[in-house]
Each structure stands twice: as C-alpha cells, then as structure tokens.
Amino acid sequence: MSFDQNQFDSILADFTIDSDELREIAGAFRYDLKQGLKDPDLSSMRMLKSYIGLPTRKETGEYLALDFGGTNVRVLRIRLDGDGKFEVLKKVAKPLVVAGEYNYIAADATADQMFGFIADLVEEAVEGDHTKKYYLGHTFSFPSSQTDLYNAKLIIWTKEFATPGVEGKVVNDLLKDALHKKGLDNVEPTAVINDTVAVQLAAAYKHDNVNIGCIYATGHNTCYLEPYADSAQEPMILNLESGGFNRLTPGRFDVELDKNSEKPGEQRLEKMVSGRYMGELFGMALAELFDEKGKAYGFTSIDMSAIMDDEDAAHPAIIQLVAEKTGHTIDAADADKVQDLVLRIVNRSARLVAASFTGILWQLQGAEKTLAPQTIAVDGSVYEKMPHAKENLMKGLSELLGTDAAAVETVLENGGSGLGAAIAAAVAASRK
C-alpha cells in the first residue's frame, strides 16, 4: 500500500506551528507567568517557590546529596571546591524494589522501612562515620508543598509509589528520624529541592548567567530565577511546573491522546513536547495512514530516534521497524514520509519548548531594549539524544528573538540531581 498524499499532508499540518502562532504561544507563556506572580491560582502553572537563589560559586566543603526521584535512590558525598569545581568522593545507589526480596514502595511497606533503607545508604556514603558533621541536600521529585528550604511536605505519591505514612509529612523530618535511629546525628538534612531546580543550581555553579533550568526528557518542566525587580523580595528560583501550561491550541491527535490519558485536561504542554508522549502521537498518526485509527502500536521516543537516524536512501531500518511494530510493509517512498512525520513531531516539540523559554526570557528582559547574556541549562534524553531536537530548539529561539538570540546559549547539565542537592545543602549551611 501507499499512503494517501492528501491525508498525509493533513496530518503534517496538524503538527505544524508557524511563526505567528509560535510568537502568540511565547506571549501567552509570559502572560501566564506574570499572572502567576500575582497569584498562582491565576496561572495554569504552579509557580512553586524553591526558597533558594543561584549559588555564589564560592561554596566549598563536603556535603551529602540524596537523589530520590524514582525507585533507584542515590546518595553521594561531594566535595565542592568553588568556581564550578567539585569531586564525587563516594556514590551509593540501590533500588527500593528488588523482586522476591523487598519492596519499599508497596502499600504494605512502611515509612520507617523506606527511610530506614535510605539512612543505611547515607551511612554507607559516609563510610560509617558518626562523628564528622555533614549537611545533606535532598532532590525530591514528587509533588510537595514547601514553606522554606527545609520544609517540604509530600502532597501525593506518583510513579506507582504507595508507601503509607509519607503523604502529608515533612520528608526531611522522616529522614532525620531515620538517621537518628542509626546513630547518624552528625548528618543534618537541610534542604529539599525539585529535580529541575537541581539542574539550574548545578549548571549555575559552573557557568555564568544560568537563569533558566529545564528537564526535557520523558517528562518536561522548567524553572527560572525570578529577579523580583519591582519588589523587596530576594531573587528566587521558581519551579513553574510548566508541563501544565495550557494556553495552547492542541491538534486533533493531542485532543485524542489527552482524552485517553491518565489525567485528562492536565499537563497540556508536557503531552505535546515530552518523550513519554511523542511516540504515542506518532503511532496515532501512523494508524490513521494505515486506516487503523485507534490502534496502538507502542512506538517510543527511542523508536523515533532510530527512524531519524536511518540515512540510507532505501530506509531499511525504518521499513523493518514499522513492520515489527505495525505488521505493515511499506516501501522506501512511504518510509520517507514516516521520517518526515517523525521530524515534524519532534520539530513541533522543540519549537514549543523554545516558545516557553522565550516567554521567560522576555520576562527577564523586562523593559530593557536588548537581552542580557543568558545560559539555559537543560537535562534530559530528548534534548541530549533525540536527533534534531536541540537544533530545532535553537532555530525556534532565533525565530522568536531575532538578533537577541545571539545572547542565549543552552548547555547540557546531566548531573544536576546530585550536584544541585549538594549545592543546596551548602547554601542552607551558609544561612545557619
């Protein structure tokens, strides 16, 4: 079979954002941002305070970093040497679930078991030292309400976690209690940050002008340093939870995906840009081309990368992958179309992320005629590994910012969860 050209063109159009629409989205993002600064309830983004600004880059000393964002928990002992220099002295990582042995995220586990397990990892990271004073920073990637750098209460577990006795509690209090039971009173939890904030802190320790941090991976989120120029407040990183931005016009595939998602009506931007959903959108479009609307093929963002990597004119890799996933055999001409479709979906994703960055950059620029130098720190598999994603993101920024785009650079920061937590601990310790 051959794909219908008119149908294919219609599908491509559904994933296309022109310059005017892109500019409107960037403006809407800035509007939502400004509304959220007045009152978070006026914005589709959460605008969560982190209670921390950028590091001075003079932070030095040994700190502990707890990275708790999924089933694999890491504890690192990191020495900060200032000016972006650091060394990981010890790293301990263990899963919270080992089939047939233990499961600390199940409904029949307890908070004591979970945090006792983490305290054991901390003891291993300090190599049994119960004397030397350590401040511990904690990257905690679950929905939390925070009133200062220390106090973060878990609102609700996500990612299939069901351990009772943690929701509604201050996670650092639970950790502190577990450390005390192990005789580790020399370890003092001092800071809790989100993983996106950790990315920005880690990059800002090494680079100048890092006013934006972003996760562009399976999920999507952005934070930025709000200068509070018109108020007496100190500059602070705000975790936007920007995946929830909804001042967008979704295409028909987006509408269908959202309707069948776990949480319809939520995370509009994330569902249009993140790695978790791109493969699904591609599969939905391909199903229409095969006249099998509604059929799920199980394509992933990794499959999309493989499709774009096939530079052979005969496209054997694309033909084989499509056959394996769908049961349909296509020719080289249709494989070309498949590649074009993937590129269009990735291009749209990158352009939307560029629009969100631009909205923040306009906010930072304020009334100034030119944009000051800006570094955007990005972590994540889509940015790092998806062909054409970074390139199209930069093109989108150029399209929106014009000559000001020369003031903007993006940097990969893929060690943020650990280093960022250590920096947060150092900042907290400096306040004592």
Image (tube, rainbow, N blue to C red):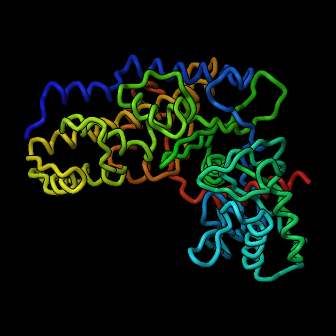
Viewer-nearest residue: 330 or 216: 330
Q: How many marks?
A: 0
The extreme front residue here reads 108
Answer with left or right where residue 192 lies relative to residue 372: right
Of the 4 image quadrants, the one containing the N terminus is top left
Rendering quarter of residue 37: top right
Dividing the picture into quadrants, the one containing residue 147 is: top right
Which residue is situated farthest in the bottom direction here? 128
In the rendering, at what x and y percent does residue 43 appear? 65, 23
Position of 216 with respect to 333 (left or right) is: right
Residue at 35% across, 31% down: 253
413 or 43: nearer the viewer: 43
19 is higher (above) or lower (below) than 323: above
Q: Is residue 397 above or below residue 142?
A: above
Q: Percent position (x, y) of residue 219? A: 51, 45
Q: Quadrant of residue 85?
A: bottom right
Horizontally, is 232 left or right of 317 in the view? Answer: right
Task: Judge whether 221 appears above or below 227 on screen.
Answer: below
The spot of residue 278 in percent (x, y) is: 38, 42
Residue toward you, 305 or 106: 106
Residue at left offset 23%, top offset 34%: 288
The image position of residue 126, as x and y in percent, is: 77, 77
User: Residue placed at 80% from the left, 67% from the top?
Assistant: 112
The quarter in which the C terminus is drawn is bottom right
